[in-house]
Each structure stands twice: as structure tokens, then as C-alpha cells.
Amino acid sequence: MLSLNRYSRGMAKLLALLLPFAILAQPASAATPEASAIIHEMNRVRANPAAYARELETLRQHFRGRLVREPGQTSDRITNEGVSALDDAVAWLRRQRPVGPLNPNGRLALAAGDHARMQGPRGNCGHDGSDGSSPLDRVARRGLSPDIVGEVIAYGPDTARDVVRELIIDDGVADRGHRIAIFDHEYTRAGAACGPHAAYGAMCVVDFADGSDSSRIASIY
């Protein structure tokens, strides 16, 4: 699955989109994660990636081929890559240096919420709003003009921990764009919003931005 991780002024960059594991014999949950807890969990990963790698590694024992069932779950989830995506995430985290914290930003949270409210009731997926807006558009509408904006979306997980775990593991995402976005040192602000989703039960949007508010066009990689 293609992932995208940035928008810069005047030019679209890749953002990240995460569809949930297929769930066997279990309806989508109506619960939604606490948005502020997602930023807290991301900061935990950024501050100590090696420790988070050790946490993720404990999940390995719960895989049977492409199926995984963690303690407390009542049914299997089917993954795209099986344990190999988990192993890749663990190895990647062990190579990362700590990154400074993301500062919670209310305007970014409002922009994320705008997308969740547009998309969730319709059961849609992706970064384009029903009104044709991009993440950069939605952030601008909320009064920010950063050089770089990024967005990641997770559909299905119903706890902040599970949202961030799935973004880090990036099962089925060839370029691992979610974990790259989470560890991008240029992102210094973030806001999250979660809500119900007609198809997957829950969705969470996280919008990132650098610390600037200018008209300079950022260089892109």
C-alpha cells in the first residue's frame, strides 16, 4: 500500500494512511481512542525507540502465520505480512535515535477533527476531504500556515496504544511511511482527533506541522 507523509506549501508530499487488519468474526468496535493519549504515546516512542522496540517484540509470540491474537482479544486478526512487519519495525526502532517531543497543538487537533467528522459518517478513507480539501487546506482553515504539514490516519484501533502500534508496525505499507512520519524531526507540533467510522468502527487522524508560520516554501525530499 502506498503511503504519503508530507504536504509542503505549493506542492503535495506523500502522506500516510493505515487501514486496519482484517478482523475475523468480530464486528468493528464503537469505542474511539482518547486523542491526547495518541500524542503522548507518540512522544513515548520518539523519546525511547529502543524501549518501544522491546515492547513490540513481546507481540511476536502471539502470531500464527498471518494471524495474530493478543491477550484479551477474542478473535484473530489477519495481517498482510505476518510477523515479518513486526520484526522489521523492531529492527528499525533499534536503529533510531531519540527525537524531541511533539507539542500538542489545538489548531492542528481541530483540523484533524474536521477530517474525522467529514469522513467517518460516510465510511470513506483517504486524505481528501468530502469538500475536496487537503490536509494543508484544513490546517490553513484553522489559522496555521506552517511550511510543512503531515497527516496519518488509522482506521479500526480503539485504544491510543493500538493506534500507535499499528502506525509503527506499518503492516502492508511498502515504504513504512507512518513510522517515518512519527520520527520526522521537522515535526514539532501535532494534534489528533478520533471519531466513529461507518465501515471500521473508529478512525483517528493525526496532523503534524513544523514550528514555522511563514510563507516560505519548504524544500522537499
Image: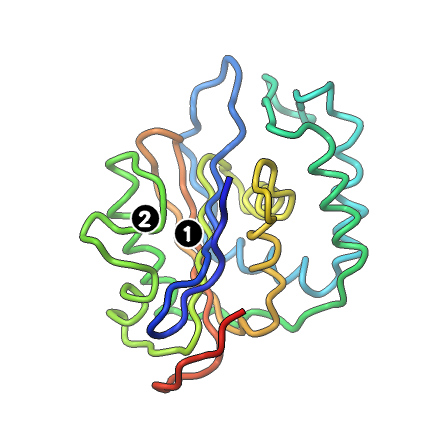
Name which quarter of the figure residue 170 lies in: top right
* Mark 2 burial class by Cα count in 10 Å: few <14, some 14-19, many 20+: many
Q: Is residue 141 left or right of residue 172?
A: left
- Percent position of residue 115, x then y: 30, 52
- The amino acid type found where label 1 is placed reads Val
- Percent position of residue 48, x then y: 75, 61
147 lies above or below 35: below
159 lies above or below 72: below
* Mark 1 burial class by Cα count in 10 Å: few <14, some 14-19, many 20+: many
83 lies above or below 194: above
Q: Earlier in the sequence, mark 2 or mark 1?
A: 2
- Percent position of residue 111, x then y: 32, 62
What's the residue at 45%, 53% (across, down)?
Answer: 35
What's the residue at 24%, 58% (across, down)?
Answer: 133
**Tags 2 and 1 in contact by the CB under 8 Å rule?**
yes
- Colouring chosen for the image of the structure: rainbow
- The amino acid type found where label 2 is placed reads Ala
Which residue is disc 1 drawn over?
A: 205
Which residue is disc 2 drawn over?
A: 116
159 lies above or below 13: above
